[in-house]
Image (cartoon, rainbow, N blue to C red):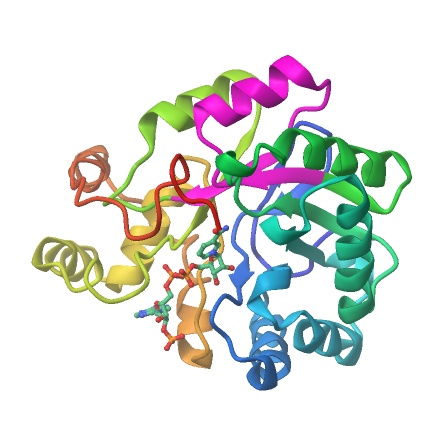
Amino acid sequence: MGEILSSVPMVQMNNGVQIPQVGYGVFQVPADEAAEATANALEAGYRLIDTAAIYGNEKGVGQAIADSGIPLDELFITTKLWTSEFGTDSVQRAFDASMHKLGLDVLDCYLIHWPAPAKDLYVESWQALSRLHSEGRVRSIGVSNFTVDHLVRLADETSVTPVLNQIELHPGLPQNELREYHAKHDILTQAWSPIGQGKGLLDSPFIVAMAERVGRTPAQVVLRWHLQQDIVVIPKTVTPSRMRENLELFDFVLSDEDMAELSAMNSGRLGPDPATFNP
Ligand SMILES: NC(=O)c1ccc[n+]([C@@H]2O[C@H](COP(=O)([O-])OP(=O)(O)OC[C@H]3O[C@@H](n4cnc5c(N)ncnc54)[C@H](OP(=O)(O)O)[C@@H]3O)[C@@H](O)[C@H]2O)c1
């Protein structure tokens, strides 16, 4: 990936590849709206797009990429392997199917979507992702929803470290232990549901008050909390004004006190617990 023309800073991963610190996620964007939403996001300045086979909208994302005319080396496209496709041969097939829908020859980043520990196939699947990487079909490989235990097992049984772990992370779930492990092993932390899925977290009176005090929106305050901890965020919105709002994060700074107050929220997890979730 070459230089990005938007104003989003780049972060270097453990393989030397750079990733934009703010991306656009398309979970729950319906298939027939994905092309328009992604086109609007690209227009707003996003260059990292985060989709997944299970979202059912890779085709729309691919359409927007093709129509945009933006050179592929200025984009960073992530998709994810669903757990029903775990296992050496299925990974190859699932990858080919995703690439066909996205209309790409080389993918920027492929992630294992969930470890689904009861299947006991995430290590074998990781080795299959490593092969795709060795073959040059994907530039970077990573994981999603891996706990420390899952990451330790990958480290013990394989020789390839994920570039990143995409996890649920927001002030309600600061994930301190996992982030410490990431820091020690040079794994980038990428936050899903970074604004807590919109409602609830953003309505919390203490965040609303902080936002008023710093002259920003609640979403901007929460996204800024991530950026100041070197976390990569991938907020989702189908609303063009919010797409722009969620990128306007680089001209203000939260104080240490505001950061600490947000980190102390600890209201809990919104999604499933990866230790016990076996989709
Ligand atoms: N790896 C995984 O297992 C996993 C799981 C979940 C999500 N993800 C990824 O992470 C991305 C983001 O997570 P998410 O979609 O769950 O949640 P999110 O980005 O935290 O929140 C999205 C919600 O917030 C609203 N919103 C967006 N910007 C806003 C703003 N500035 N002000 C007020 N509301 C705003 C959106 O509404 P509108 O769209 O109506 O504007 C939408 O309802 C996903 O799209 C996906 O790519 C990954």
Where is 209 relative to 141, above or below?
Answer: below
- Identify which residue, 178 or 151, lies in the foreground: 151
Residue 106 as seen in the image, left or right of residue 221: right
With respect to residue 263, does 77 lie above or below?
below
Image quadrant of residue 67? bottom right
- Residue furthest top as drawn: 156
Determine the residue located farthest toward the right in the rendered image.
135
Query: Does the stretch in magenta take in 232?
Result: no
Image x and y of residue 184, in percent: 50, 16
Look at 82% across and 67% down and name the residue there.
Answer: 100
Q: Where ligand 1 lies, by image quadrant?
A: bottom left
Q: Residue at x 72, y 41 (%)?
A: 87
Image coordinates for residue 158, horizontal then vertical, percent:
70, 19
| Residue 159 drawn at (x, y percent) | 73, 18
Residue 245 position by quadrant = bottom left
Quadrant in which residue 193 is drawn: bottom left
Q: Nearer the viewer, residue 25 or 217?
A: 25
The residue at 40%/34% (across/down) is: 275
Q: Nearer the viewer, residue 54 or 24?
A: 54
- Residue 63 placed where, x, y %? 74, 78
- Is residue 82 at all visible to an observer of this figure? no
Q: Is residue 222 above or below residue 141?
A: below
Judged left or right of residue 99, residue 180 is: left
Give the residue displayed 71% in from the left and 75% down from the top: 59
- Relative placement, left or right, of 276 versus 279 is left
Q: As displayed, is residue 70 above or below residue 196? A: below
Would residue 154 be counted in the magenta stretch? yes
Question: Over which residues does the magenta segment extend?
Answer: 141-168
